[in-house]
Amino acid sequence: MRMKTVLTAIVAALGFVPGAHAQGCALCYTTASATSTAAQHSLRLGIFTLLIPALALFLGVFILLYRRAIAAAA
């Protein structure tokens, strides 16, 4: 129960960071907004596609460390 509360607090804290929603690169924003809607959709899909392996690696390492911590405590 405590771990769930901590994870919820971390996700909430990271979600309220103003810079997390838009990194503020004016050149990237201008270039992306000048493209057609099909190209914008492709950019969004590409970003999502690149996000999946990074999240999988992060979660894999996190789960591995969590399991080792549980095994060490027991």
Image (spheres, rainbow, N blue to C red):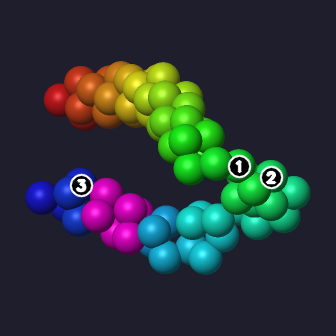
What residue does disc 3 label?
A: 3
Q: Name the residue carrying label 2.
A: 31
Image position of 49 (left or right of 10): right
Residue 40 picture location, percent across and down:
59, 47
Residue at coordinates 20% horizontally, 57% vertically from top-left?
4
Residue under the point 27% across and 26% down: 67
Residues at badges 2 and 3 in contact (C-beta under 8 Å)? no
On the rendered image, what quadrant is the N terminus found in? bottom left
Taking the spot 40% from the left edge, 63% from the top edge, the residue there is 10
Q: How far apart are marks 2 and 3 (CA)?
A: 42 Å
Total count of labels:
3
Closer-to-camera residue (1/16):
16
- Alpha-carbon distance for marks 3 and 1? 44 Å
The answer to whether the residue labelled 2 contacts the one labelled 1, judged by CB atoms less than 8 Å apart, is yes
Q: Is the magenta stretch mostly helix, strand or loop?
A: helix
Mark identifier at residue 69: none
> Is residue 29 found left or right of 49 in the rendered image?
right
In the image as oriented, which residue stretches furthest toward the right?
27
Reply above or below: 54 against 39. Answer: above
Circle 2 crowding by C-alpha within 10 Å: few under 14, some 14–19, many from 20: few
| Disc on the earlier residue, 2 or 3 | 3
Mark found first going from the N terminus, 3 or 1 = 3
Residue mark closest to the camera, 3 vs 1: 1
Task: Identify the amino acid type marked 1.
Answer: Thr
Query: Tag 3's secondary structure?
Result: helix
Nearer to me, 62 or 34: 34
Q: Name the residue under label 1.
A: 35
Residue interval drawn in magenta: 7-12
Q: What residue type is labelled 2?
A: Thr
Instruction: State the SS at label 2.
Output: helix
